[in-house]
Image (tube, helix red, strand yellow):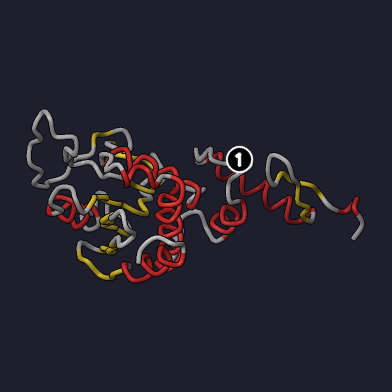
Amino acid sequence: MSADDRIATPKSATGYRTITPDCAKLLRRAEGAIRARGVLKVCENANRTALVKEVFEGMSVYPSREDVKQRVIKAICALYRYDRELLDVDANERSITHKLAEHLQREFPAWHVDCEYNRVGRDTKKLAVDVSKPEPDDIEARTVFPDIIVHRRMTSENLLIMEVKKVSGRNDTGDVNKLKRFTEVPEYQYKYGLLLKLKQDGASELELYKNGKPCECWTGDLQRILKELGYGG
């Protein structure tokens, strides 16, 4: 294939890669479909391969459980790699979840990733969960809103709800109740729920919830990969 038969597409700010005209056509169709749905995270540093895969496997089809696990663990590893200081200084959980959401957005380029999102379409998100009233000086104040969600705004496509807590922080009863309710109540029914308990030394815990119940522990996979990266004994 000659150089004239290839189309260059951005790879990074300083480099390019070449793809065939057919692949370029698929990319254009994929990006057009995503923009039409309001997902504007199509940019040079997006994971275009994953983006195209999601679009052409069907925009309404959710990623598999194993796919979600791999992406989430990659995002958590990125948090340790690039934002370890937040854990070392025992920053409040909202600061940590904000940075984790940024890493998750890179792993889910065809979805919206939001923190403490309080809407269902245009309505206010409501849920019958016992969340104690926070004190004025409670920097880890609990709310009924999820810490992080992966979804498509203004649709009923709710992929993932994630509650994040530091092991040194608050009791996780309220977080567990939210995960159970948001994954079972028909109005929301997130496909997956995750409880992440963060520890500075890499011994973090990750548990999967589905249909209102804990169903799988991902702690072993998470700790193994963190240990390979040098986090944890």
> In the orientation shown, which residue stands out farthest toward the top?
136
Q: Quadrant of residue 148?
A: top left
Q: Residue at x 61, y 56 (%)?
A: 49
Vertical arrangement, residue 120 with respect to residue 64, above or below: above
Q: Quadrant of the C terminus?
A: bottom left
Q: Residue at x 69, y 39 (%)?
A: 13
Q: Nearer the viewer, residue 233 or 139?
A: 233
Q: Nearer the viewer, residue 200 or 29?
A: 200
Q: Residue at x 54, y 57 (%)?
A: 54
68 left or right of 51 in image: left
Amino acid identity at mark 1? Cys
Q: Position of residue 230 (x, y in %)?
A: 44, 62
89 left or right of 19 in image: left
Q: Position of residue 169 (x, y in %)?
A: 18, 48
Q: Position of residue 24 (x, y in %)?
A: 73, 51
Q: Quadrant of the N terminus?
A: bottom right
Vertical arrangement, residue 197 with respect to residue 89, above or below: below
167 left or right of 117 in image: left
Residues packed near mark 1 inside 10 Å, few (<14), some (14 to 19) or many (20 plus): few
Q: Residue at x 8, y 32 (%)?
A: 135
167 left or right of 83 in image: left
Which residue is under mark 1?
43
